[in-house]
């Protein structure tokens, strides 16, 4: 499930927001869950689900924004970097935003 779908009119992009409220614990389970969520988000964009649900957004560039309540740990940062690179091959931007304390 996608947390938020929005249209960033300034950037002209479709934005899918992934909220990560929990602290990062460096566990394999947390990293696998993160990868699975990204797979679902990418699938939503690439497999026609977004076009079906939001035809007004078809053809706009896409960005996945990960909004974190806590700074990701080193293992999570490594995985996020790999995910960023893989999404770039599909012309999908990815940003990580850490909430200011």
Image: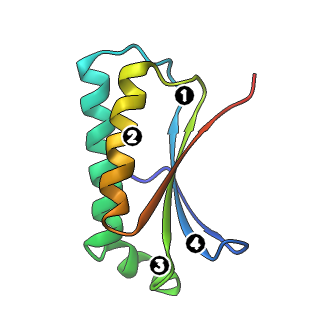
What percent of the width, then of the height, locates residue 33?
Answer: 28, 33
Tag 3 secondary structure:
loop
Distance CA(mark 1)–CA(mark 2): 19 Å
Of the two numbered discs 2 and 3 on the same chain, state the one appearing first in sequence: 3
Q: How is the image coloured?
A: rainbow
Identify the residue position indicated by label 3 in the image. Answer: 54
- Mark nearest the camera among 2 and 3 is 2
- Sequence order check, earlier mark of 1 and 2: 1
State the SS at label 1. loop
The residue tagged with tag 2: helix, strand or loop? helix
Q: CA distance from mark 2 to mark 4?
A: 21 Å
Residue bearing the label numbered 4: 13
Disc number placed over residue 81 in the picture, else none: 2
**Tags 1 and 2 in contact by the CB under 8 Å rule?**
no
Q: Residue at x 39, y 69 (%)?
A: 91
Q: Quadrant of residue 97?
A: top right
Label 1 Cα crowd, 10 Å radius (few <14 / some 14-19 / many 20+): few
Of circles 4 and 1, the one toward us is 4
Mark sitting on residue 21: 1
């Amino acid at each position: 499930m996608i947390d938020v779908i929005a249209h960033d009119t300034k950037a002209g992009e479709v934005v899918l927001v992934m909220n990560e409220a929990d602290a990062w614990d460096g566990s394999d389970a947390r990293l696998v869950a993160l990868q699975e969520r990204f797979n679902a988000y990418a699938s939503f964009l690439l497999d026609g689900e977004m076009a079906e649900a939001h035809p007004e957004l078809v053809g706009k560039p896409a960005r996945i924004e990960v909004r974190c309540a806590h700074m990701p740990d080193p293992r999570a940062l490594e995985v996020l970097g790999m995910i960023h690179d893989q999404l770039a091959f599909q012309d999908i931007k990815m940003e990580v935003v850490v909430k200011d304390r």
